[in-house]
Image: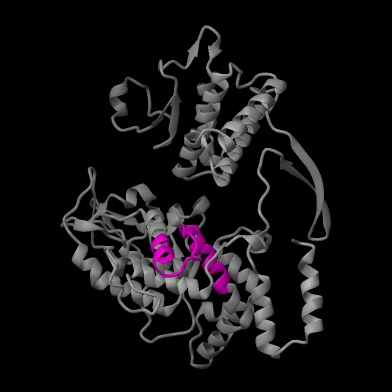
Amino acid sequence: MLVHYFSAEGWQSWGLGGQPLIPERMPVLLDDDFVFEDEDGPRATRAVNAWLRTLPSSGAPSPNSWRAYALAARDWLVHLRRHRVEVFGAREELVAALGTYADRRLSGPLNERLDPSSWELQITALSRFYGWASREGLATAVPFTVAVGKRMVQGRLVETERNQARMRRPKPHVTVQYLEADFANLFRYGLAGLGPDGLEDATFRGRFPGRNAAMGGLVLGTGMRSREFTYLLVHEVPPLPAEPTEVPIPWAVPQLGAKGCKFRTTWINYPALAAVHSYAALDRELSRGSWRPKNPLVVEDADFYGGRVNGRRTAWSALRPEERLRLVGPDGGSLLLALSYDGRPFVDWGTLFRRTARRIRDRFEPRFPDVAPHRCRHTFAMATLEKLVEGHYRQAAQLAAATGDSSGLALYLLKADPLLILRDLLGHSSVVTTEVYLKRLDVHRIYRAAWEKAHGDIHPAVLAEADSEFEEEF
């Protein structure tokens, strides 16, 4: 079974009455004979393709999600075909097929085995597919068993469901979800090609340390997701204040690049923003070349808000990530903030972060964890919450107000609850989402440290009583 990624380029020559209603880069499943129906009627690939086309309007706008769901559906269809089980067959057969599928994917041959996170993605994709198929009247049975329970949410007893095919999550206290301050600094040094002492590492053989360190500081300082910071344009970098400030500097996250296409404003601290400006003015200028993509979008008269793209004034906020990759200056060279050789855009941050973490672990700190872009987001959330709880930003806002800076952000820092501030920075739809998100991280340490800082040493009996409040959670 094949997976093809749709492109509408040249559709006018296909003999159609109008442009196909298929999103660009949408995966399409094809059987090896390129047939979508036979004497028995439409094949399962046709139903999967119809479901995939609903993803952009049902909470999965990212092409990366479409690809992951398509590959999960393909593997499931291949497994069912191997055992001669119909995709919309009887429940007994589907349940048995799911059992053999789990056995093969979790403990089968090494080349087919999935890690727990990949298995969770498979189950999520198949659950969404069968849910859609049931609503469409295609499926009368599903392969999953759902356990029903109840829990308290904001003082109300609500009913919950859990798919039994999912693996049990490890308790939050036994996993490393974010980087502590010392590890975060170690990661920044590693990206810059430095050792733990901040001095040059003679064994470093990487390239573009200035770019990597500036972008790493940007991610740790803003909490942006990988899709959000990867496609930032150099013109979207906020101006650097004339004087260093303890009040964070607002940074608008491009709407079409954000998760769910939801606009939000995060922030960045002065040193991290200064490092980005230094990179843009020095290292980036040395990398700026004459590179051009296949179908370039040439930009002239660019400023903080937009530019003339192929002769038409366009706002940066109106550009999708794939369009941002095609933006070049009049003399060539990508307009993305992070550049590689000859002005080419650099986008593979996941690989770069993993390699940096591996080098730190091998050279300096055996306990150092793997680092993915999203772990940097968790690190930002925890570091920001710590400063909010300790009152750091509130004190900075008071100082700014006392010196005549009446910015909206300073007022917001003085008036808003820490969780509300963090909700807005992370782009969550409600503070309940932020609370659930934080519950999966180690927030107890932050509140305890803040209390110790404010009240000094705490009596052991008090500590024991406080610790007992959390024993049952683990």
- Residue at 50% from the left image edge and 37% from the top image edge: 110
Relative depth, front residue between 237 and 272? 272
Residue 145 in the image: x percent, y percent?
Answer: 73, 34
Residue 169 in the image: x percent, y percent?
Answer: 66, 51
Range shown magenta: 357-384
Residue 371 in the image: x percent, y percent?
Answer: 47, 60
The answer to whether 178 is drawn above or below residue 78 in the figure is: below
Judge left or right: residue 17 versus residue 329: right
**Image-quadrant location for residue 86:** top right
Q: Is residue 375 magenta?
A: yes
Query: Which image quarter is the N terminus in?
Result: top left
Relative depth, front residue between 307 and 348? 348
The answer to whether 13 is drawn above or below residue 62 in the figure is: above
- Residue at 31% from the left image edge and 51% from the top image edge: 325
Judge left or right: residue 257 versus residue 308: right
- Residue at 53% from the left image edge and 86% from the top image edge: 396
Res 434 visible: no
Res 138 visible: yes
Relative depth, front residue between 416 and 220? 220
